[in-house]
């Protein structure tokens, strides 16, 4: 009887050892630590491993001081006036702008302040001839706004606050001023991007975009070749004629017959 019990005990021990070895082989061949990473649940892991953090998208950085852009404005000619204004969003969507002339459009829900500043000479007396000429054109009916220049030392600044949904553009004549600078400011604590307020992503760079020929509808119901002309990547349109408040885009033409 004692011999039978010892034999039985020996058989059970061998079975346990064999089973353990078999389990060890299974872990080596099938289940590895990398198979049971957080949130995994397959044939090698009975349940998902708890504790995996759920990724949260990084928030768009706010602008604590409200300044979205503060750098040079590209394309300012050394003489004469030039005009800036273009509805980038409508052009990207391939639809006509709701504003009849070329204008930026503030499509953000916030007012945005556009400031244009310049370095003016202080080494000699030149009166108003030292100061730049600045005016804004706003709304669909092109309201002409000439804000007063604020002068601090050698810096002269003109600014205008654009409402949400408002169209706007500006004309600049340097005269004896230089270093035209654009500053775009939102109310503190809110956030919007340059394209949301209607401006290009790189106002400091003015790359020429050649004119594209098209076919226009004429006043007499006929059609004829035409083109709106060249423009620049930062919204610069071309020379501005202050005497009658209009601008001309280089390369623009229209071959419709003259109206009778």
Image (cartoon, rainbow, N blue to C red):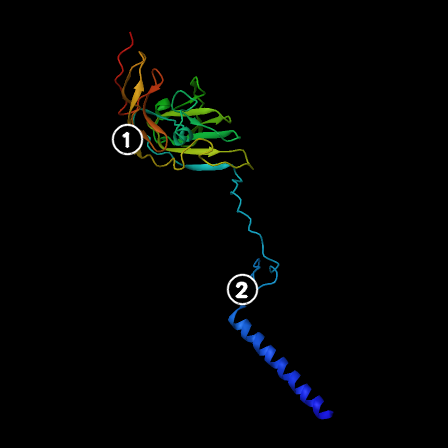
Packing grade of label 2 (10 A; few <14, some 14-19, many >=20) is: some
Per the image, the residue denoted by label 1 is: 210
Evaluate whether residue 241 shows in this view.
no
Check residue 48 in the rendering and tell me which mark sits there, or answer none.
none
Name the element at disc 1. Answer: loop
Q: Is residue 204 above or below residue 243?
A: below
Would you identify the image quadrant in which residue 200 lies?
Answer: top left
Would you identify the image quadrant in which residue 129 lies?
Answer: top left
Q: Residue 213's spot in the image, x, y percent? A: 27, 26
In space, the residues marked 1 and 2 are separated at their CA atoms by 58 Å
Q: Residue 7's spot in the image, x, y percent? A: 67, 89
Q: Is residue 89 left or right of residue 243?
A: right
First in sequence: mark 1 vs mark 2: 2
Per the image, the residue denoted by label 2 is: 35
Q: Nearer the viewer, residue 47 or 199?
A: 47
Count of all numbered marks drawn on residues in the image? 2
Q: Residue 40's spot in the image, x, y percent? A: 56, 59
């Amino acid at each position: 009887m004692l011999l039978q019990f010892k034999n039985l005990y020996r058989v059970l021990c061998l079975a346990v050892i064999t089973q353990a070895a078999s389990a060890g082989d299974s872990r080596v061949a099938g289940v590895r630590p990398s198979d049971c990473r957080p949130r995994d649940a397959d044939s090698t892991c009975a349940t998902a491993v708890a504790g995996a953090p759920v990724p949260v998208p990084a928030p768009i950085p706010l602008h604590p001081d409200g300044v979205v852009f503060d750098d040079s404005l590209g394309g300012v000619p050394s003489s004469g006036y030039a005009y800036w204004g273009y509805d980038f969003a409508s052009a990207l969507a391939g639809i006509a702008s709701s504003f009849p002339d070329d204008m930026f459009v503030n499509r953000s829900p916030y007012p945005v302040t556009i400031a244009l500043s310049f370095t003016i000479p202080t080494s000699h007396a030149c009166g108003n001839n030292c100061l730049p000429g600045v005016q804004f054109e706003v709304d669909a009916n092109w309201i002409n706004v000439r804000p007063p220049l604020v002068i601090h030392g050698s810096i002269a600044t003109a600014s205008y606050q654009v409402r949400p949904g408002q169209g706007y553009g500006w004309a600049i004549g340097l005269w004896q001023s230089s270093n035209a600078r654009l500053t775009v400011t939102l109310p503190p604590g809110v956030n919007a991007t340059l394209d949301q307020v209607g401006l290009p992503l790189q106002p400091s760079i003015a790359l020429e975009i050649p004119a594209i020929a098209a076919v226009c509808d004429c006043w007499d119901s006929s059609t004829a070749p035409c083109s709106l002309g060249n423009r620049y990547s930062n919204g610069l349109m071309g020379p501005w004629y202050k005497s009658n408040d209009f601008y001309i885009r280089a390369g623009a033409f229209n071959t419709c017959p003259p109206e009778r």
